[in-house]
Amino acid sequence: MSGVGPQSDSFEALAMPLFDQLYNFAHWLTRNREEAEDLVQETYTKALKGFSSFQLGTNFRAWMYRILRNTFLTSRTGLKVTMTVPLEPEEDGPELAIEHDTPETILLERSNRDLLQGALDELPVYFREILVLCEVEEMSYQEIAETLSIPIGTVMSRLSRARKTLRDRLQPQSQKGSAAIAKGTNRAL
Amino acid sequence: MPCESWKTKLDTYLDGELPSEEMRAFDIHVHSCSSCAADALARVQMKRGIQAAGKRFAPTAEFRRRVQGTIATKPHYSFRRMWVFAAALSILAVASLLSIYLGVQRSRTEQAYSEIADLHVAALASSSRVDVVSSDRHTVKPWFQGKIPFAFDLPEVQNSEFSLLGGRMTYFGQTPGAHLIYAVRKHEISVFVFQEGVLRGRWDESSAVTKELSFNVATWRQGGLRYFVIGDAGTADINNLAKLFKATSS
């Protein structure tokens, strides 16, 4: 065994498979490579120290994400974000689906990933993080609630508003793109 | 329930977070309501877009090694505790793997059906639906030579109610396949042919035709190839075209 303790072995086995996902999430939060690396490094250090308090059988992934997010919120960038972003109202109900000519369909037609990445990047951090957790990490509402330490009802309403905000922000860009394409087509004709 | 009431729950439905009874009721509604089906499709596309756009940042190998090196320095614990912990981990890992496997299989199948429906809709919406325009199977089949990494047979449809409109190349999971379009009365039906290994999922092969996003779909495996017949025509038409293909390829 050469002094290798079982607990940290287990920690490594559980935590390292999450490394890429946690880094991606950290980068979406900080929007900066160096800060994302610092955040991930600190998360792993804290998690290893606190691993003895982790209860086996509970959600390890949500536990790691919660540590990362709490670490971010107490970092200089995180504090700046939470101090400059206004508190969001939670009382909005779920919005209705859009009937036609949606940004989604326009988006699909052009396969414009850059447009979507840009729009995601510009979202407030509390919208950005919940969309990444839900759509990219495919977390359940329960896992998201555990990670963000909010009730499931808030997860649902915040997700709904995040999606609506993203669509609203894509709409003008999509229309701009459509106009450019139409202009190009007319010129070609 | 009016459509607007369904739509307020559309995102929750697509996230798979409604109670199972409501999920079933929603499935039935979406299959019968073209407006909700269209909205569902648009939102699924948005979800996929975010998923693709969101997987954007990857750590460097050097950074991974650095962190791994940090957490590899660990304190001593007793062997007894180590074995208990290892046993618990194994059970946790097996249970997690099992649930992940089942979940992944289900989601792969749903995603594949959804992508097949997208390919069908996108082709019909396109101004140039087919790359090879011909009702003659002896013209359409050779056109695929050298374009796709397999060969397949087209049925003779002259004495049936179907007519071949043509074919085009298509891609699924970055692998090429064949897309044929047939007409029956005023309906247009797509037939997709891919190599079996490309499409991973648990296909429903027990019944001939299933409903996916309001389309009728038949799928089967034959000769190492995976066939899909999809369209808004009735189940009998989908089934009849599938039978013609099965008979030709057997």
Image (tube, coloured by chain):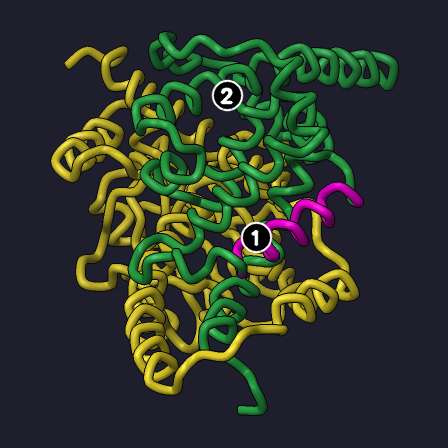
The answer to whether residue A112 is above or below residue B216 is above
Instruction: Say which residue label 1 marks.
Output: A46
The answer to whether residue A174 is above or below residue B201 is above
Q: Which mark is residue B184?
A: none
Q: Colour of chain A?
A: green
* Element at label 1: helix
Instruction: Say which residue label 2 marks.
Output: A162
Q: Colour of chain B?
A: yellow
Residue at 71% x, 27% y: name it.
A118
Image coordinates for residue B242, horizontal then vertical, percent: 31, 58
Residue at 25% x, 19% y: name it.
B6
Question: Mark 1 and 2 residues: CB-CB less than 8 Å, in contact?
Answer: no
User: Nearer the viewer's eye, disc 1 or disc 2?
Assistant: 1
Amino acid on which the number 1 mark rests in the picture = Lys
Nearer to us in this view, B34 or A87? A87
Q: State which quadrant residue B211 falls in.
A: top left
Chain identifier of the residue bearing label 1 in the image: A
The answer to whether residue B27 is above or below residue B94 is above
Screen quadrant of the N terminus of chain B: top left
How crowded pointer 2 is (Cα within 10 Å; few <14, some 14-19, many 20+) is rated as many
The answer to whether residue B80 is above or below residue B163 is below
Image coordinates for residue A25, horizontal then vertical, percent: 60, 43
Residue A134 lies left or right of residue A112; in this view the side is left
Extent of the magenta region:
A34-48
Residue at 50% x, 79% y: name it.
B76
> Which residue extends farthest bottom?
A1
> Which residue extends farthest left?
B21
Residue at 30% x, 39% y: name it.
B16
Residue B23 lies left or right of residue B99; in this view the side is left
Screen quadrant of the C terminus of chain B: bottom left
